[in-house]
Image (cartoon, rainbow, N blue to C red):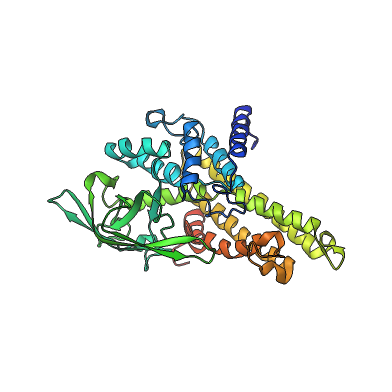
């Protein structure tokens, strides 16, 4: 299999890199990116997204009728990975999750309203699946949606957790229970404006110093026009969206930059006057980190190979996410072990190796293994859908 880019694809990558070099700024780029840290949560970051949109770089693989260029999905991949290496925000939620699901399943009203706004970078989304009793098992969600025939819509009441973008997003992509008699065939996806008077948002801070949120629903009315696809078929759409999320929002770039930083640190550092690069155990850890990075890349290529052919890479996405996130944890553990007590110093603390990069990464990689579906859930998907093992194996 040939993984090399074509001349046109390389030309696009170079043009994109030149754009990012020209717009490099600590306001929009995380100097030490993690997989889930690159959100469009400020006005300067929205400005960068608008710049990408002006150049036609958002939704490049979308159909022309919805503003896309009908290019191969490899262009979306190049965009995502290049942004991730620069620590720039990712467009994955709107373009890759909400947009693609609306194209597949949305009614004409949703397509006309949202797709132009997404591709022009005018709207940001929060994703609402997890609940206090339905974290890893999103199909157990109990946010109640009751039919209101008089007003032609649904009334939502309940509670969501781990909604990372709720405090800055414009719209809420949320799953709710419309049929309590069926676990998987009783969920519907709704789009709700985040400024709805019935929504109450409370911050939750993670071990990685990132903000996520709890969202409380109190008689939130949603018109029928803002139901995504068919009523009670939302679990199918959520599964498709989660597969897209594991690919669109989990680039390998941050892991690549961390492996480079660790290798450079070992190469240049000394302990008691002796170079660390000659310590056999550290040489082994560097080799393991470089090998695991390459394995993650190849697993990601399997996802891309399926996605660009129009498939939904369920098992491939789970394999990639599981391996890449767990490799990130192992790398952070190796780095802190190699750095000794000084490795525990927080970022911007005097004497912290690599300015505390791996102290933060050690904490943040725990978050990576949960967002977009916990590692245990990925193992279940691989076992059941990939290997055909029984549910109670």
Residue ranking furthest to the bottom: 341
Identify which residue, 81 or 360, lies in the foreground.
Answer: 360
Q: Position of residue 263 (x, y in %)?
A: 74, 55
Residue ranking furthest to the left: 150
For residue 254, side relative to residue 374 (left or right): right
Instruction: Say above or below: 22 vs 264.
Output: above
| Number of numbered callouts drawn | 0
Q: Is residue 345 visible?
A: yes
For residue 33, side relative to residue 70 (left or right): right
Residue ranking furthest to the right: 273
Q: Position of residue 371 (x, y in %)?
A: 48, 58
For residue 280, side relative to residue 127 (left or right): right
Residue at (59% x, 39% y) in the render: 20
Instruction: Say above or below: 71 vs 341.
Output: above
Identify which residue, 118 or 317, lies in the foreground.
Answer: 118
Residue at (62% x, 59% y) in the render: 328
- Residue 140 placement: quadrant: bottom left
- Residue 109 placement: quadrant: top left
Q: Position of residue 222 (x, y in %)?
A: 24, 51
Residue at (49% x, 46% y) in the render: 313
Q: Quadrant of the N terminus?
A: top right
Q: Position of residue 163 (x, y in %)?
A: 41, 58
Q: Is residue 91 visible?
A: no
- Residue 332 placement: quadrant: bottom right
């Amino acid at each position: 299999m040939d993984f090399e880019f074509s001349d046109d694809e390389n030309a696009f990558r170079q043009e994109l890199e030149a754009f990012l070099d020209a717009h490099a700024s600590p306001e929009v780029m995380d100097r030490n990116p993690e997989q889930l840290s690159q959100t469009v949560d400020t006005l300067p970051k929205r400005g960068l997204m608008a710049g990408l949109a002006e150049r036609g770089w958002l939704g490049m693989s979308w159909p022309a009728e919805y503003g896309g260029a009908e290019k191969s999905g490899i262009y979306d991949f190049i965009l995502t990975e290049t942004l991730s290496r620069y620590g720039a925000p990712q467009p994955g939620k709107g373009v890759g999750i909400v947009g693609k699901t609306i194209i597949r399943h949305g009614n004409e009203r949703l397509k006309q309203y949202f797709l132009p706004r997404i591709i022009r970078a005018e709207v940001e989304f929060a994703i609402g699946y997890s609940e206090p009793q339905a974290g890893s098992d999103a199909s157990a969600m109990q946010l109640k949606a009751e039919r209101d025939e008089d007003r032609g819509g649904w009334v939502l009441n309940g509670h969501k957790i781990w909604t990372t973008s709720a405090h800055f997003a414009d719209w809420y992509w949320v799953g709710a229970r419309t049929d309590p008699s069926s676990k998987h065939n009783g969920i519907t996806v709704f789009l709700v404006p985040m400024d709805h008077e019935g929504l109450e948002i409370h911050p939750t801070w993670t071990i990685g110093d990132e903000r996520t949120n709890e969202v409380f629903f109190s008689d939130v009315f949603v018109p029928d026009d803002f139901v995504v696809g068919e009523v009670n078929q939302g679990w199918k759409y959520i599964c498709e969206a989660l597969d897209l999320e594991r690919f669109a929002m989990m680039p390998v770039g941050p892991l690549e930059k961390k492996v480079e930083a660790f290798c450079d640190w070992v190469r240049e550092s000394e302990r008691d006057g002796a170079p660390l690069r000659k310590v056999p155990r550290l040489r082994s850890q560097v080799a393991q980190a470089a090998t695991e990075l390459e394995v993650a890349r190849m697993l990601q290529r399997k996802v891309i190979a399926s996605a660009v052919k129009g498939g939904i890479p369920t098992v491939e996405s789970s394999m990639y996410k599981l391996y890449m996130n767990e490799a990130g944890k192992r790398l952070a553990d190796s780095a802190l072990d190699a750095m000794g007590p000084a490795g525990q110093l927080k970022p911007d603390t005097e004497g912290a190796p690599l300015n505390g990069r791996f102290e933060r990464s050690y904490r943040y990689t725990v978050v990576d293994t949960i967002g977009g579906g916990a590692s245990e859930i990925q193992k279940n998907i691989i076992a059941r859908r990939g290997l055909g093992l029984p549910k109670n194996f």
